[in-house]
Amino acid sequence: MATDNLTCSSIGDFTLSGIPNLEGFEFFLGFPLIIMYMVATIGNTSIFYIITMSQELHEPMYIFLSMLSVVDLLLATTVMPQMLGIFWFNSRKISFPVCLTQMFFFHFLSALESAILVTMAVDRYVAICHPLQYSSILTQRAITKTSLVLMVKGATAMLPLPFIIQRFPLWKSNLLTHSYCVHQELMKLACADIKVNVIYGLFVALYVMGVDSLFISISYLLIIRTVIFLVDEVSLKAISTCSAHICAVLIYYIPYIGLAVVHRYPSDTFSNIHVLFGNAYLLLSPVINPLIYGIRTKRIRYRLGQFLGHGQTIAALLNHDCRGIIRKILR
């Protein structure tokens, strides 16, 4: 493993640390990691497939959910195979261009997920507070325009990040404490004034995550104000439709806020907590979101049950045919 350099020098690659102080257990940590990756892949793919193939689920709420599943799947694929390579094959080197590319997609997909959570909050606000105008406000055209705006917003906000990192000619070290490349850590390794990176990083955090969290909070404050005046049964039903989204928001924002806070201080201050928050921020959403929506969303659960039921029926028929063929051969 690379060690910290005492002098500044140019570098061609970085060394990923995995999980500091747990190097002896990394091989065994690979097993839960691959299970989590399989859960994220199968879960998000299943939700996307069910929503795409079921015509009655082509509603704004489920369209946004399918978008969230795609982003979660891409986010998991961007980093988890790299982490598995560290744990099982000791593949710790990552070239400078690949590191910058991974950093961009990690931040871009994170911003995109945050924006989708905002649209889902607005969707719940319109459905509960303005139910009669729901279909006229959230039309297919409005959803398409919203999706394009979200992608452009995330891309334009994160596109400068690789360039303001690439401008640094010399580096203090090539050793990264995370299992992937993240802007907050890369800029601290540069042998130069990082004031531009700090200011732009703060701007991105406020512009993307800050504005998004503000809109989510406002949406739920308006929902709560409306629900208070509803009948108990109706209010409980309204709140239950938001429960899955609230869980997704908490799972996304709590690790992100923790990661943003600890990165404002030297790594020695919080030991390896910044690595813990970084991995939680990355792993929780892609794994838990499909489980939450698969359990809490009745129509998704029903369609998933139908899908699994058909699979069991086909497996039973194949099994029955195989037994018949074996009997004929034995005769």
Image: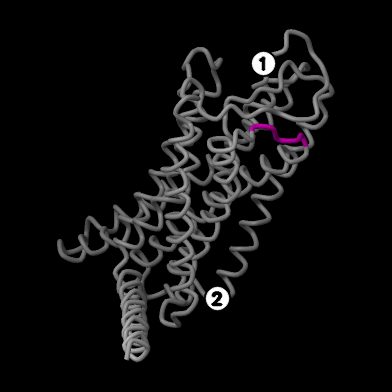
Q: Which residue is at 43% across, 43% downward?
A: 31
Q: Quadrant of the C terminus?
A: bottom left
Q: Secondary structure at mark 1?
A: loop
Residue 173 locus on image (x, y percent): 71, 18
Near-viewer residue (231 or 253): 253
**Vertical placement of 106 versus 200: above or below?**
below
**Vertical placement of 171 versus 275: above or below?**
above
**Vertical placement of 90 versus 120: above or below?**
above
Q: Amino acid at mark 2?
A: Gln
Q: Quadrant of residue 188?
A: top right
Q: Which residue is at 67% across, 27% downward?
A: 15
Residue 68 locus on image (x, y percent): 50, 58
Q: Which residue is at 29% across, 69% downward?
A: 298
Q: Amino acid at mark 1?
A: Thr
Near-viewer residue (59 or 165): 165
In the rendered image, residue 186 lying in the magenta stretch gets the answer no
Which residue is situated farthest in the front direction here?
331
Q: Which residue is at 49% across, 13% downward?
A: 269
Disc 1 from disc 2: Cα separation: 54 Å
Q: Which residue is mark 2?
A: 140
Q: Is residue 290 left or right of residue 169?
A: left
Q: Which residue is mark 1?
A: 3
Q: Main secondary structure of the magenta part?
A: strand
Which residue is situated farthest in the left direction here?
232
In the rendered structure, which segment of residues is drawn in magenta?
Answer: 92-96
**Label 2 environment density (alpha carbons within 10 Å; few <14, some 14–19, many ≥20):** some
Q: Earlier in the sequence, mark 1 or mark 2?
A: 1
Which residue is situated farthest in the top direction here?
6
Q: Secondary structure at mark 2?
A: helix
Near-viewer residue (313 or 102): 313
Q: Quadrant of residue 313?
A: bottom left
